[in-house]
Image (cartoon, grey):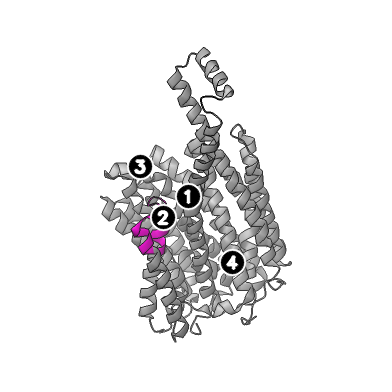
Amino acid sequence: MSDSPSPQSLGGLVSTERTIAAVAVAMGTFMQVLDTTIANVSIPTIAGDLGVSADQGTWVITSFAVSNGIAVPLTGWFMARFGLVRTYVAALAMFTLASFLCGIAWSLPSLILFRVLQGFFSGPLVPGSQALLLNIFPPTKRATALGVWSITTLVAPIVGPILGGYISDNYSWPWIFLINLPIGIISASLCYAYLGKRDVPPKKIPVDVIGISLLIVWVGALQILLDKGKDADWFNSTEITVLAIVALVGFGVFMIWEWFEKHPIIDFSVMKSRNFVLGMIVNSLGYALFFANLLIFPLWLQTNLNYTATWAGFVAMPSGIVAVLLTPFVGKFLGKSDARIFAALSLVCFGTSFFMRANLTTQASLFDFVMPALVQGAGMAMFFMSTVTLMLYGLDHQKIPQASGLSNFVRITAGSFAASMVTTFWDNHAAFHQSRLVERTDQGNPLLGYTLESMKQAGLQVDQAFGLIARTIRVEAYAKSAFDFYWVSGWLAFLLIALLWFARPTKGPSVGPVAAD
């Protein structure tokens, strides 16, 4: 979009001002990313308190995801129309207000309405923070800016479930939303104080009403499909089939409209850059693998190995700690090196951590579970910084808001696909392994007879013995299914490395006109 703002006026901050502004922006981003996961573990508590079923309670998640998915790709247009700082501060303030409304919600319909508002106003925060940080810092310190952004984006999804579970267990669920108030107020105030007067003037850009309408239709249908697909048995459900058709047709019509629209709501000219396309693919698919494993691992620990939500979170926490500790060092060297090398190393770490988990057993110790998390943390420290550097290499400053909005939308959508598919894969393969294990424990199996005899001697009744065997089979089946997924994830992570070498090499934080390469 040629009318995008040129946020050069955000430069020129002295070191102290830049640090305060960056921390303020990072606080807002952390709060938004935290909110995408903090409510997930609290759904049973929320549903019970509001007197609805757990299935109805999941609309608290779906409503946020749908409105957020619609708003994210609109970020570039919002920033072009109203300015980078104005858009970010306004979105942050309204997100904080919506969080307060969620905290005082008196019924499920009211909570869903306020979550829709919260999700929509959270849309510009992640891509907007990325664009702001990249323009607050000079080109020579772009890696530092990406480091700040990466830490908040990577650590928040890990902290979210832990914090959400702790608040739900020890306090009341409204506090998972009300804790946003002081953070949001401080962050918005500091951002406006240090950056507000430096924002570019707004530009009167025509509103692509048809484009926005088409976007709402197909993204909304897609997000509901992904969120409800598993519970509805996917395409065995008429509702899911209709949603899939609406999403597919809507997407096709949207792309055709945007291609010929003079003032498109999404600027696809950034797709002319080979680095942007390849970087976005690796960034999105790599994130999908990371997010899927982040989802299934604590779920496996809780449902099969009797870990509490808090302890499952503690097992995953070392990866976030390692990422935070290593990110400054990665940022220091990334600006002087080829980003493809760091991206490849991050995928090696991801793949290795997945393979390490694939070799675990149900008798593994806490130390055995933590070791892969440490390796994964090293990958996290490099992944986002390197892939975003690869994406934005060669792009003009004017294109950054649109590129950030588009790439973050694709990444978030890829994560939604991964979240939907991983649980289906896990259940289906567990059923397969369970049938195979049952075949080995039929009545004529001498090993089963020996096991039953041992249990009888231990004082168990026959029914109790069979119940214990059934549970053991179920635990082993889900473990084998999880290990299968880790193996697949590991190989996919290593395969993604090949894509990196089709991109142009990066030599520091270069920017310039996007080339059609």
* 2 and 1 marks in contact (CB < 8 Å): yes
Sequence order check, earlier mark of 3 and 2: 3
Q: Quadrant of the C terminus?
A: bottom right
Residue farthest to the front, as pictured: 444
> Mark 2 = which residue?
234
- In the rendering, at what x and y percent does residue 263 appear? 44, 84
Residue 234 appears left or right of 371:
left
Can you say whether 275 is above or below 97 in the image?
below
Q: CA distance from mark 3 to mark 2?
A: 27 Å
Crowding at dot 4, Cα within 10 Å, few <14 / some 14-19 / many 20+, comes out as many
Q: Which mark is residue 281?
A: 4
Identify which amino acid the numbered label 2 is placed on: Trp
Crowding at dot 1, Cα within 10 Å, few <14 / some 14-19 / many 20+, comes out as some
Can you say whether 300 is above or below 346 in the image?
above
Q: CA distance from mark 4 to mark 1?
A: 23 Å
Q: Residue at x 52, y 12 (%)?
A: 457
Identify the element where label 1 is drawn: helix
Please name which of the two marks, 4 or 3, marks the residue nearer to the observer: 4
> Mark 3 = which residue?
45
> Mark 1 = which residue?
424
Identify the element where label 2 is drawn: helix
